[in-house]
Amino acid sequence: MEIKVLESVKDIPCEVLVINKFEDEKTSQELANTYAVDKDNFEGKFGQTYLLHTLGKIPADKILVVGFGKKEEFNADKMRLAVSKAVKKLQQIHAKNACFDFDVMCDYGKSAAIGAMIADYAFDKYKTEKAVRVDEITFAKFSEKDVKEGIIFGEAMKFARDLANEPADFATPSKLAEIASNLDGITAKIYDKDEIERMGMGAYLAVGKGSAQPPKFIHMKYSGKNPKKKIALIGKGICFDSGGLDIKPAASMLTMRDDMSGAACVLGVMRALSALEPDVEVHGIIAACENMPSGTSYKPGDILRAKNGKTIEVDNTDAEGRLTLADALCYACELGVDEVIDIATLTGACVVALGTTVAGIMGNDEDMISTIIRTAADCGETFWELPLFADYKDSLKSDIADMKNTGSRMGGASIAGVFLKEFVDGPKWAHIDIAGTAFLEKPQKEFIAGATGAGVRTLLNYVKNS
């Protein structure tokens, strides 16, 4: 989809002119009044749409009126959803181009562009019959700068969604390393198995032992011109999670290509940084591997030694993500960064607690956590803080090692966070659990089923505003 901005679209020929109507208000556009929108009981409730033909009276072939709901409740979040609704309607009528001319007081160009790109997304790479898409849209009145920033965010989300939707035979650890090495404006160092072993990453290495795919430890770096802060972003990169020897049921394994959604998020963010040009130093870190069963797999009862020297008893091989993150966190803390943020499809417990629209967040600095939560809300994502009470650590006690890799099923998301905290030394740290939000089994709000690009908007906004 190509997105343009003009001061006015009044005289631009197009297939569809998209306008808005607020609830309980007269339609402000003369066009809508001319075509008797109000007389046909179009109330303008949020999400309503009304399509009519112009009969050649204006340059547009059709008019699509979108309900914006109550004016006092309208915001950037609703703009994104309203534009998404409009684009989906354009797809239904097979429109290839449209002009958007909204009567709003604020400049919602960034949200509008993101909404359009989310709605126009389809993962049809492997389909003979391709999805119906809108080729071109033009926004009137919005700031070109804001729309361009929205496009950067939208492209980063699309990039992450594509990666997480790819089958595991494509999105291997080696493929992720190749992608990282070719990002514009980013330097990348890729560590192979021998180098990972020399760095003492015994927890991470154990997870990948059963796979024919070699592990790849990926360290990307973006350097702003005058960096005010150093941030490390860590994405969980389990390219396929069978559960290992504690193997998952077949139904649970079907979508486990998405277990690298955290890595996809970080790659999407790093890809966008050269276009955004924030004055921040950002490190993108991925401990990529597969968790597979074989004669060489790590086993329940094994004792692993992490990079910081702490030992871990393997209680369950399907709690593998935290093992890879443990060594990645140790590595990140040695970089001298101010903040570390890890993002991962980590626990089913988080899905049970928060569902599929809310991500869990926890960490060691309340101000940082609060800022990330506000940042998420500003760009249409919802995060909820979960506790890291010291008592949770009792659940991880081992008789033969410093800790186990799993504890009680109750409070599982927080227990996983307490485990990760053992490998953070120095920087402020936040852990984001996107197990429920990263991949949808059915359409939800503006998203189709599949990968959502969870976390991309929030982390990009956070880095940009740091």
Image (cartoon, rainbow, N blue to C red):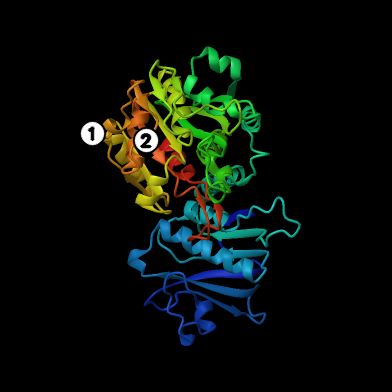
* Mark sitting on residue 391: 1
Instruction: Please provide percent x and percent y for residue 59.
Output: 65, 72
Q: Quadrant of the C terminus?
A: top left
Q: Quick one: SS at disc 2?
A: helix
Measured along the vertical axis of the image, is residue 382 above or below residue 323? Answer: below
Q: Is residue 110 left or right of residue 184?
A: left
Q: Residue at x 41, y 32 (%)?
A: 341
- Does residue 288 appear anywhere in the picture? yes
Q: Is residue 113 left or right of residue 26?
A: right
Residue placed most toward the observer, 337 or 124: 124
Q: Hey, what amino acid is under mark 2?
A: Ala
| Res 108 → quadrant | bottom left
Instruction: Please provide percent x and percent y for residue 393.
Output: 28, 31
Q: Earlier in the sequence, mark 2 or mark 1?
A: 1
Q: Quick one: SS at disc 1?
A: helix
Q: Quadrant of the N terminus?
A: bottom right
Instruction: Please provide percent x and percent y for residue 297.
Output: 56, 28
Q: Residue at x 58, y 43 (%)?
A: 257
Q: Residue at x 47, y 23 (%)?
A: 203
Q: Residues within 10 Å of mark 2 (few under 14, many from 20)?
A: many
- Does residue 152 appear anywhere in the picture? no
Instruction: Please provide percent x and percent y for residue 383.
Output: 36, 47
Residue placed most toward the observer, 36 or 231: 231
Measured along the vertical axis of the image, is residue 430 above or below residue 205? Answer: below
Q: Is residue 396 left or right of residue 159?
A: left
Q: Is residue 225 left or right of residue 15?
A: left
What residue would you read off at disc 2?
Answer: 416
Between marks 2 and 1, how big is the CA–CA gap?
13 Å
Q: Hey, what amino acid is under mark 1?
A: Asp
